[in-house]
Image (cartoon, rainbow, N blue to C red):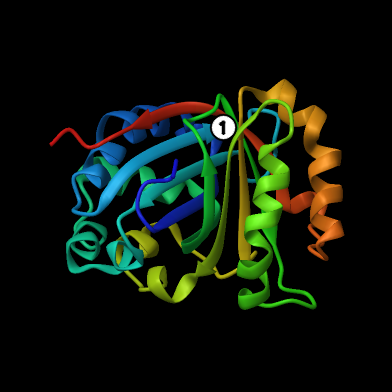
């Protein structure tokens, strides 16, 4: 299974223009290494789409289990931000973050780009989504250029605790989602070409995703624990 563990945490957000340069250094040199030092964090990735005006940045953390993202060790980090974090977090906005339970994860490796589709449960539910997940993932994985497909159901109850970091960035509850579909491919060109076909496959399964809830991110950074 290409996603390590049984759960993941996904984040979409923007950074105010005056903080973008510092954000990239902070996220690469301090923040992601710090997160990968928390027990149960198994791999982290950051993606970016410079053409987007909203939700330009993507972060994905693969976890041992759902409890990884609500564990005391993780909450301790969130409640004790570093000086660099104190400077960076207020530049975040349009923030969406949730732990997700993996419904299925198939394929191999990490692609050069990832498409994300935030799915609302409109006429379906989590059990139905998990039931259709294997067939849908198989269909998407068979598309040319796709190397892995991951489907997860959102568990905001796991990551919804108020912490010092959430206070710093003024996190809101806007733009909630019920499930997410992640499609890893060799690059942006391939995913752009496949986007209409992927959308059609979702609609055939009665999963209706608004265009604003889809995006394609180029891989910017990937890190694994050093221990």
Q: Which residue is mark 1?
A: 48
In the shown orientation, is residue 223 left or right of residue 202?
A: left
In the image, residue 193 above or below residue 169:
above
Question: Looking at the picture, how far across and down is residue 71, in whole percent?
Answer: 23, 67
Rendered position, 102 above or below 218: below
Q: Is residue 176 visible?
A: no
Image quadrant containing the C terminus? top left
Instruction: Say above or below: 19 vs 99.
Output: above
In this rendering, position of residue 162 left or right of residue 132: left
Residue for point 59% across, 29% down: 113
Give SS at disc 1: strand
Q: Is residue 11 visible?
A: yes
Q: Residues within 10 Å of mark 1 (few under 14, many from 20)?
A: many
Q: Which quarter of the picture shows residue 126?
A: bottom right
The single residue placed furthest to the left in the displayed view is 227
Q: Residue at x 35, y 35 (%)?
A: 27
Determine the residue positioned at 82% across, 62% down: 208
Compared with 120, 142 (above or below) is above
Which one is nearer the viewer's eye here, 211 or 192?
Answer: 192
Image location of residue 128, percent across then percent down: 68, 74
**In the drawing, does residue 85 fall left or right of residue 219?**
left
Residue appearing at x 66%, y 39% in the figure: 141
**Residue 6 location, quadrant:** bottom left
**Nearest the camera: 191 or 143?**
143
Q: Quadrant of the N terminus?
A: top left
Number of dots carrying numbers = 1
The x, y position of residue 209, in whole percent, is 79, 58
Q: In the image, residue 11 lies at what x, y percent? A: 49, 51
């Amino acid at each position: 299974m290409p996603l390590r563990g049984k759960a993941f945490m996904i984040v979409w957000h923007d950074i105010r223009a005056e903080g973008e340069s510092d954000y990239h250094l902070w996220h690469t040199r301090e923040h992601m290494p710090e997160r990968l030092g928390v027990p149960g964090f198994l791999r982290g990735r950051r993606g970016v789409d410079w053409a987007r005006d909203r939700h330009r940045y993507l972060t994905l953390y693969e976890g041992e289990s759902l409890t990884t993202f609500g564990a005391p060790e993780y909450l301790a980090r969130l409640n004790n931000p570093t000086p660099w974090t104190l400077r960076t977090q207020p530049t975040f906005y349009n923030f969406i973050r949730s732990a997700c339970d993996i419904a299925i994860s198939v394929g191999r490796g990490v692609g050069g780009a990832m498409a994300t589709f935030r799915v609302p449960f409109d006429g379906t539910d989590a059990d139905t989504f998990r039931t259709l997940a294997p067939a849908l993932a198989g269909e998407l994985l068979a598309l040319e250029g796709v190397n892995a497909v991951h489907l997860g159901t959102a568990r905001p109850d796991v990551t919804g605790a108020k912490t010092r970091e959430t206070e710093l960035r003024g996190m809101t509850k806007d733009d909630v989602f019920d499930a997410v579909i992640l499609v890893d491919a060799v690059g942006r060109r391939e995913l752009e070409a496949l986007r209409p076909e992927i959308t059609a496959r979702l609609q055939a399964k009665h999963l209706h995703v608004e265009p604003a809830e889809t995006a394609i991110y180029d891989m910017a950074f990937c890190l694994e624990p050093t221990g």
